[in-house]
């Protein structure tokens, strides 16, 4: 019944605007302006939540619509291009791939087009964090933390600072010394900011049948601070690198379809109160719907990419033109280092067309085809997933906009299993860091497509924003807040149903 209620809310979205506070200069769309009346009926029909779990739904195998890749399942399956891009676009994709894999070097160097690393940084290339375009992981044993980092931020201290957040001018305020991201590497001749430290404690969780599952609870700190103390009100938010697949299709979801599911005041009384993340476009400053990043802090794939270039690698771009990356004004030694901008190549270290090519590549990493969709246990697991209430946040499917910028992304039935809204996930997962409209308890619903191939592509099974969950069962049991009822439904289910749900997730 709860799922049917939510479906009716989606249908009514053409008439009802979600009760959400927006900027004065942005009117949230309440209907699909890209569709004909005939299209509307088709979209409503095909995205209606299923009630038949005896067989797969039509087109369920093609998670990314016509863009889905049917490539052999191996470590490279996340690195395939959308199946439906043109031959000419394949060249653009390959050029973007080369830049995504490119290692940047410190300035000055003989390879001038690669100058500009850091001076403080977390990785030397995009691929270093998103290895094989997959998910990052926390450091285990002696391994480094290249695919994981700490976001740094403090809350607003004055009404004026709060007004800047409320107007979407900024999402938060960096640490005065260490900036917005803790950098554990530096170019030669400069000290890194320090090192991230993680301490784990085992925390038992007893399931309904008496089975005890051990959850590892992390505590984060920093050591070897090279530039003085960190601010007393600075918060540490750990983040692992997200998988890269399907981003262009997510961008092509019409904002009205996401906003239709927002229920910030829980008007329908189902305990789920998803909120949209409203942010500013990095280049234009226009107010838009955020949908990328752990807290949906970026509105577009390009915003996500330029932010990573600047914060992770220390590379300037037209969207983030600071040549010294995240170096703060108090890190004088960092600001005294040479940068890599070459006037003959452009005004920034990664000028266009670099950003255009990397963005196109990131937008067109294909979603792999589903596996075992007709397996009886997978179908049973899908039913358990629905009946437990998981689809209240993990919305199974959408039809993308006919107005999408890339023809390959237009009017595609896709299955990301996310509502792309912010949800309170409880104290257990809280980082206590505000990011724009997201408070310290809220996270964007993570898309589930492709997560069944995490072990194949990334070689590990660590999940959640900081990789604390060592498997899918632990990831579910960490859910709290708005997801507590769904978690408890899973925890109290029979072992057969729990196993079936996990097998369903492994098929995505």
Image (spheres, rainbow, N blue to C red):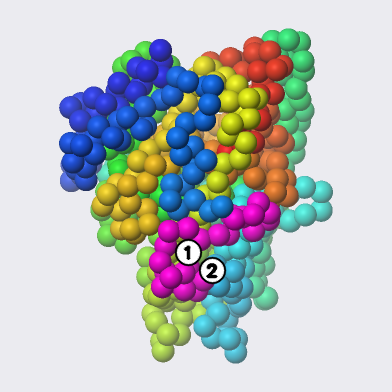
The residue to which callout 2 is attached is 97
Q: Residue at x 82, y 49 (%)?
A: 141
Q: Is residue 2 above or below residue 185?
A: above
How far across and how far down the image is residue 183, in percent?
61, 59
- Circle 1 crowding by C-alpha within 10 Å: few under 14, some 14–19, many from 20: many
Between residue 250 and residue 224, name the one nearer to us: 250
Taking depth in this image into account, of 177 and 167 the one nearest to the observer is 167
The residue singled out by tag 1 in the image is 361
Does 303 lie within the magenta span? no
In which quadrant will I find the C terminus? top right
Residue 35 quadrant? top left
Q: Which quarter of the picture shows residue 124?
A: bottom right
Indicate the secondary structure of the residue bearing disc 2. Answer: helix
188 sits left or right of 422 in the view: right
Quarter holding the N terminus?
top left
Q: Nearer the viewer, residue 158 or 250?
A: 250
Residue name at image x 37 percent, y 18 percent? 4
Residue at position x 47%, y 58% in the image: 83
How dense is the environment of label 2, judged by Cα within 10 Å: few (below 14), some, or many (20 and up)? many
Q: Is residue 174 left or right of residue 5?
A: right
Segment tinted magenta in the rendering: 71-96
Q: Residue at x 37, y 70 (%)?
A: 318
Name the spot of residue 106 as percent of width and height, x first: 60, 78
As helix, strand or loop, the secondary structure at mark 1 comes to helix
Query: Tags 1 and 2 in contact by the CB under 8 Å rule?
Result: yes
Q: Which mark is residue 197?
A: none
**Mark 1 → mark 2, Cα distance in angstroms:** 6 Å
């Amino acid at each position: 019944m709860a799922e049917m209620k939510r479906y009716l809310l989606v249908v009514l979205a053409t008439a009802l605007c979600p009760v959400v506070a927006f900027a004065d200069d942005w009117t949230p769309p309440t209907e699909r302006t890209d569709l004909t009346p005939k299209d509307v009926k088709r979209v409503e029909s095909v995205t209606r939540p299923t009630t038949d779990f005896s067989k797969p739904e039509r087109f369920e195998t093609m998670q990314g619509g016509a863009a889905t890749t049917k490539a052999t399942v191996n470590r490279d399956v996340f690195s395939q291009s959308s199946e439906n891009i043109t031959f000419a676009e394949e060249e653009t994709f390959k050029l973007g791939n080369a830049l995504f894999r490119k290692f940047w070097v410190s300035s000055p160097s003989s390879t001038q087009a690669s100058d500009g690393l850091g001076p403080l940084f977390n990785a030397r290339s995009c691929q270093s964090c998103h290895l094989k375009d997959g998910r990052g992981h926390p450091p285990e044993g002696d391994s480094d933390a290249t695919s994981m980092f700490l976001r740094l931020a403090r809350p607003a201290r004055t009404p004026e600072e709060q007004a800047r957040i409320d107007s979407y001018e900024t999402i938060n305020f960096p640490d005065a010394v260490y900036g917005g991201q803790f950098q554990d590497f530096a170019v030669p001749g400069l000290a890194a900011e320090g090192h991230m430290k993680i301490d784990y404690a085992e925390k038992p969780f007893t399931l309904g049948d008496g089975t005890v599952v051990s959850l590892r609870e992390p505590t984060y700190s920093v050591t070897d601070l090279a530039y003085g103390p960190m601010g007393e009100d600075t918060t540490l938010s750990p983040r692992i690198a997200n998988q890269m697949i399907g981003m262009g299709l997510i961008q092509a979801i019409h904002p009205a379809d996401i906003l239709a599911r927002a229920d910030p005041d829980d008007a329908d009384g189902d305990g789920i109160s998803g909120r949209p993340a409203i942010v500013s476009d990095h280049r234009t400053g226009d107010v838009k719907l955020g949908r990328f990043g752990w807290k949906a802090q970026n509105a577009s794939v390009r915003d996500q990419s330029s932010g990573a270039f600047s914060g992770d690698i220390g590379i300037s771009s037209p969207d983030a033109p600071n040549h010294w990356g995240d170096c703060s004004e108090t890190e004088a030694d960092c600001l005294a280092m040479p940068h890599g901008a070459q006037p003959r190549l452009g005004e920034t270290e990664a000028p266009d067309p670099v950003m255009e090519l990397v963005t196109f590549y990131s937008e067109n990493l294909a979603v792999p085809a589903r596996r075992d969709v007709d397996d009886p246990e997978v179908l049973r697991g899908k039913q358990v997933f629905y009946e437990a209430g998981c689809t209240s946040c993990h919305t199974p499917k959408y039809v993308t906009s006919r107005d999408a910028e890339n023809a390959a992304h237009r009017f595609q039935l896709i299955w990301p299993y996310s509502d792309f809204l912010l949800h309170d996930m409880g104290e257990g997962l809280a980082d206590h860091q505000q990011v724009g409209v997201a408070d310290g308890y809220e996270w964007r619903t993570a898309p589930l497509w492709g997560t069944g191939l995490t072990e194949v592509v990334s070689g590990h099974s660590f999940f959640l924003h900081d990789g604390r969950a060592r498997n899918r069962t632990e990831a579910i049991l960490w859910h709290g807040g708005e997801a507590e009822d769904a978690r408890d439904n899973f925890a109290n289910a029979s072992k057969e149903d729990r196993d079936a749900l996990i097998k369903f997730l492994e098929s995505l």
